[in-house]
Amino acid sequence: MPDTPEQDPYFDCLPVNKQPSIRVLAMPADTNSAGDIFGGWLMSQIDIAGSILGHRVTNGRVVTVAVNDFQFIKPVYVGDLVSIFTDVNRIGNTSLEVAIVAYAERKRKVEECTRVASARFTYVALDKHRKPRQIERD
Ligand SMILES: CC(C)(COP(=O)(O)OP(=O)(O)OC[C@H]1O[C@@H](n2cnc3c(N)ncnc32)[C@H](O)[C@@H]1OP(=O)(O)O)[C@@H](O)C(=O)NCCC(=O)NCCS
């Protein structure tokens, strides 16, 4: 995925023909002391979205082992509808790296959408003993 608006004319546009892993409304309870949405809340939503793809791809339980990259691009505000999209970057023996992009549709301005964060998370597939599990390939 291109990383800047210069590289990608659709940088701030919701992807078309693609479903988000999750879509969630930013609520007042998720704010920091300044009244904006807390960065940790967005990180946690991004982790959840990535793990959903990890679970699908590995057909079972996954755990987050690393945050390889995380960029907060724009703030999230109360009332924003946050949509998080995921793609597999790489599949290893027991791990996979997921590319994740979050967009916010601003409150009462559904036509205004902006990219708020991008990240790469690594998940490890676990077996019932909590040990790394081989990922089956098609
Ligand atoms: C995930 C966990 C089971 C891996 O155990 P481990 O003994 O380190 O396993 P391995 O060394 O065999 O590594 C497993 C895979 O993870 C990858 N990996 C391990 N650490 C990594 C890191 N820091 N970054 C990227 N990949 C990593 C390895 O490369 C390997 O991938 P591969 O099999 O595709 O080649 C263990 O580290 C763990 O339980 N961590 C805590 C996870 C957790 O609680 N997450 C939530 C935090 S709130």
Image (spheres, helix red, strand yellow):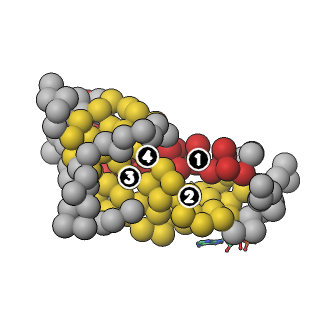
Query: At which x and y percent is residue 129?
Result: 85, 53
Return the residue found at the far top: 108
> How far separated are the C-alphas under marks 3 and 4?
5 Å
| Pointer 2 or 3: first along the chain | 2
| Pointer 3 or 4: first along the chain | 4
Query: At which x and y percent is residue 17?
Result: 42, 39
Q: Residue at x 75, y 68 (%)?
A: 93
Depth check: 82 or 65 in front?
A: 82
> How far separated are the C-alphas under marks 1 and 2?
8 Å
Residue linked to disc 1: 53
Depicted 83 relative to depicted 96: above or below: above
Residue linked to disc 3: 101
Check disc 2 and report its element: helix, strand or loop.
Answer: strand
Mark linked to residue 88: 2
Check disc 4 and report its element: helix, strand or loop.
Answer: strand
- Disc 2 crowd, CA 10 A, few/some/many (<14, 14-19, 20+): some
Question: Does 112 sit left or right of 134 as displayed?
Answer: left
Quadrant containing the N terminus in the rendered view = bottom left
- Disc 1 crowd, CA 10 A, few/some/many (<14, 14-19, 20+): many
Residue linked to disc 4: 85
Report the amino acid beneath label 3: Val
Q: Quadrant of ligand 1?
A: bottom right
